Structure formats: structure tokens, C-alpha cells
Image (cartoon, rainbow, N blue to C red):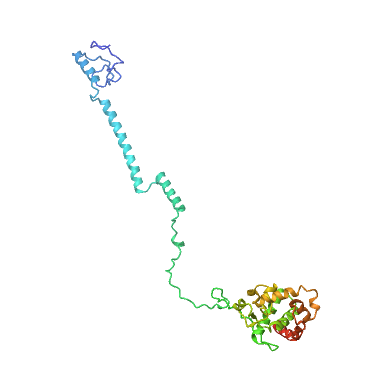
């Protein structure tokens, strides 16, 4: 109990544990146990004690020392942070992890990009601007080069020199008879019979008929008057040999004659005049025999 008539409240605001503003204390640092002199103004003490508690902004020596210590620690921390930042700016420190990741990502993107830059050592040599090439004369054979090969003209029919006293028109008609027979596969004997029959019937000239004016509308070499007989074999349209326009063609007339000839049984073993008469049914059946040797010469000349 204090001698100023107040009780010490150890749990109050002015307890002895944190009463740093009291200047008079019963315990001195010198170790004196003498009681302190009583204060004359007990009410002043109460004003001072509770006034300090009511005004927290009143400066106290203990709080001042704590504030100074806290400020010193903060300054040291700021100094350390500024030092680290300076080291980062100077580049002496290791780059931040985020910068390293960004650099690796940029390198990966470049390796996968379409516009990847080629190193200087591997860069291709620039190609000079293309110039107009100088035409070079072609050394290819024009006869063997397909691009420049000219189509060969069709070979002209071989002109056979007339034999056996025939002129060129007669020889050409004889050739037409032989060619048509070969196309049909008729043997040589049948070709000789056909040429000999044409020698007897038309003297190997393509005849038109004066009785059939229509026959004169087609190529012909002579005009006859034996009823309606036309062509090399003097075949009659009225007898069923064919149309006038067809019988005026040497190849068609020959096919009609040979088709009838090969249908005669044993025609190859028959005499020429008998075989020809079996087809033609002429009023002069023995007349065909006289042309056999000439027909043989003509056929051999054409087939050779």
C-alpha cells in the first residue's frame, strides 16, 4: 500500500509493471530501502497517472526506443532490397526464372516456325537472275524425232507395166480383179479364170450401157448395147447381179463373179472355158478358152 492514500492496482493502466513515467519509486537503483517522501498533491498524481492513460499519444521513453529500433530494421531491409535490384540491373546475377522460360519458349517457337532463318554457313548461294537462253540448233534427226517428224505420204499404188498386148486402162482393171480375188482368198486358178472371162466379156474395159442411161452417170471407159449388161463382166441388173451403181465398180463386179464361181462343185478341176460358162451362161461358151494364156501372163505379172 502506498503512503499517498491510493491502492496499487497491478491490473490497472497505471500498474507498477509498466509505470515508466513515475519519477519517485520506493525501490531505487542504489539499493536504498528508505521509503520515499509522501507527495503533497495526491490529486495531482491521479491527474498525471490517469491523464497519460487517457492520452495514448503522450510520448513515453519506452515507446520512443521501440519506434527507433523498428525504423532501423526497416531501413536495413530497404537497403538489402535495393542492393539486390542493383545487382539484377548490372546483369551480374542469374536471370529471373520467368526470363529464362521466355527465352526457351522463343527458341522453341523459332525451331518450329515456317520462316526459320538459315545459318549463314548453310545459306544457299543466291541464284543469278535468269537470262533468256540462246537457242541452240537441234542436232536431232528430223526423220527420227517424233516432234518434228513429218507424216510420210501414203505410198502410191504400184503401176504395173502392161503385158500381153494390153493398154494401161486394161492393165489397171486386171489389177483390180486380182486384188479383189486375193482379198477373198481365192487361189491363183480362180484369178486366171476371172481375168480371162473379163477379156471375153468387155475386153477388160469398164462398160456402161446405152440401154441403161443411169450407168453412164458412173466412171466408165466405153458404152455397150447388149441389153442391160454393164461393167467388166457384163452382168445384168435385171438378172439379179446387183444394182447398177454397184456393178459399175470393178471390185464389186469381181466379188460377184468369184462368189458364184467358188460355189460350183469341182470348179478348180474344170476347163477354164467350162468354169467361166458355168457362171456366165453365155451364148458362146467356147470363146473363153482363147484368153487363157494371156490371162495367165497378166496374173503372173501382177502377183510377181
Residue reaching furthest to the left: 40
Residue beneath the point at 75% across and 86% down: 290
Q: Nearer the viewer, residue 140 or 65?
A: 140
| Numbered-mark total | 0
Q: Quadrant of residue 59?
A: top left
Q: Nearer the viewer, residue 120 or 37?
A: 120
Q: Is residue 1 above or below residue 71?
A: above
Instruction: Name the image quarter holding the C terminus.
Output: bottom right
Instruction: Name the image quarter holding the N terminus.
Output: top left
**Residue 22 visible in the displayed image:** no
Residue beneath the point at 33% across and 42% down: 83
Residue 240 picture location, percent across and down = 69, 72
Residue reaching furthest to the bottom: 165
Residue reaching furthest to the top: 5
Residue 106 picture location, percent across and down = 42, 50
Q: Quadrant of residue 158?
A: bottom right
Judge from the rendering whether residue 285 lies leftward or rightward of residue 159; answer left or right.
Answer: right
Residue beneath the point at 29% across and 28% down: 66
Residue 148 picture location, percent across and down = 54, 75
**Residue 50 visible in the displayed image:** yes
Judge from the rendering whether residue 258 lies leftward or rightward of residue 122; answer left or right.
Answer: right
Residue beneath the point at 79% across and 76% down: 267
Judge from the rendering whether residue 52 lies leftward or rightward of residue 215; answer left or right.
Answer: left
Q: Quadrant of residue 259?
A: bottom right
Residue 212 picture location, percent across and down = 63, 77
Judge from the rendering whether residue 143 lies leftward or rightward of residue 270; answer left or right.
Answer: left
Amino acid at each position: 500500500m502506498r503512503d499517498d492514500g491510493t491502492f496499487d492496482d497491478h491490473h490497472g493502466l497505471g500498474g507498477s509493471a509498466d509505470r515508466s513515467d513515475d519519477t519517485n519509486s520506493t525501490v531505487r537503483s542504489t539499493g536504498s530501502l528508505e521509503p520515499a517522501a509522501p507527495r503533497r498533491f495526491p490529486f495531482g498524481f491521479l491527474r498525471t497517472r490517469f491523464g497519460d492513460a487517457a492520452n495514448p499519444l503522450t510520448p513515453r521513453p519506452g515507446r520512443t526506443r521501440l519506434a527507433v529500433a523498428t525504423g532501423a530494421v526497416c531501413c536495413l531491409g530497404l537497403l538489402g532490397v535495393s542492393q539486390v535490384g542493383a545487382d539484377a540491373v548490372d546483369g551480374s546475377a542469374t536471370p529471373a526464372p520467368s526470363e529464362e522460360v521466355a527465352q526457351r519458349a522463343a527458341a522453341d517457337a523459332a525451331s518450329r516456325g515456317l520462316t526459320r532463318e538459315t545459318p549463314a554457313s548453310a545459306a544457299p548461294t543466291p541464284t543469278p537472275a535468269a537470262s533468256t537462253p540462246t537457242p541452240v540448233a537441234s542436232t536431232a534427226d528430223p526423220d527420227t524425232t517424233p516432234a518434228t517428224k513429218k507424216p510420210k505420204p501414203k505410198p502410191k499404188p504400184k503401176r504395173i507395166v502392161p503385158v500381153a498386148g494390153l493398154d494401161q486402162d486394161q492393165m489397171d482393171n486386171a489389177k483390180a480383179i486380182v486384188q479383189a480375188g486375193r482379198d477373198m482368198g481365192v487361189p491363183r486358178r480362180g484369178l486366171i479364170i476371172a481375168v480371162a472371162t473379163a477379156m471375153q466379156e468387155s475386153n477388160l474395159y469398164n462398160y456402161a450401157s446405152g440401154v441403161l442411161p443411169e450407168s453412164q452417170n458412173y466412171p466408165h471407159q466405153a458404152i455397150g448395147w447388149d441389153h442391160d449388161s454393164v461393167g467388166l463382166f457384163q452382168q445384168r441388173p435385171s438378172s439379179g447381179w446387183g444394182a447398177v451403181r454397184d456393178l459399175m465398180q470393178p471390185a464389186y463386179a469381181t466379188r460377184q463373179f468369184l462368189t458364184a464361181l467358188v460355189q460350183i462343185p469341182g470348179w478348180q478341176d474344170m476347163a477354164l472355158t467350162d468354169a467361166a460358162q458355168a457362171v456366165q451362161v453365155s451364148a458362146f461358151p467356147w470363146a473363153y478358152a482363147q484368153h487363157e494364156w494371156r490371162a495367165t501372163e497378166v496374173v503372173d505379172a501382177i502377183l510377181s
